[in-house]
Amino acid sequence: MIYWALIFLIVAIIAGALGLTGVAGAATNIAWILFVVGLVLALVFMITGRRPRI
């Protein structure tokens, strides 16, 4: 998730530099959502202590 968030953030930065504000805004929103979801999943897995089944 964090990987895809960084990809969309890079797309947003490039689109913003080229003046494509609509694309930049959409990519920024997608990057933010993916980052938050990835962070929440990381916290949940860290708290629950996900272990392999024996």
Image (cartoon, rainbow, N blue to C red):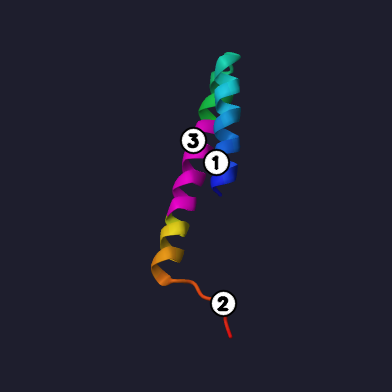
The answer to whether the residue labelled 2 contacts the one labelled 3, judged by CB atoms less than 8 Å apart, is no
Q: Is residue 37 above or below residue 30?
A: below
Along the line of sight, the residue nearer the viewer: 54 or 19 = 54
Q: Amino acid at mark 2?
A: Pro
> In x, y percent, where is residue 53?
57, 82
The residue sitting at the left extreme is 47
First of labels 2, 1 by sequence position: 1
Q: Secondary structure at mark 3?
A: helix
Name the residue: 55% across, 24% down: 13
Name the residue: 49% across, 35% down: 29
Residue extent of the magenta highlight: 27-39
User: What is the magenta segment's predominant secondary structure?
Assistant: helix
Q: Circle 2 is placed at which residue position?
A: 52
> In x, y percent, where is residue 19?
57, 13
Q: Circle 1 is placed at which residue position?
A: 5
Give the alpha-carbon distance from disc 2 to disc 1, as whole Å. Answer: 27 Å
Q: Amino acid at mark 3?
A: Asn
- Neighbourhood count class around disc 1 (C-alpha, 10 Å): few under 14, some 14–19, many 20 upward: many
Q: Is residue 2 above or below residue 16?
A: below
The circle drawn on residue 29 is 3
Name the residue: 38% across, 67% down: 47
Magenta stretch contains residue 34: yes
> In x, y percent, where is residue 4?
59, 43
The image quadrant of residue 44 is bottom left
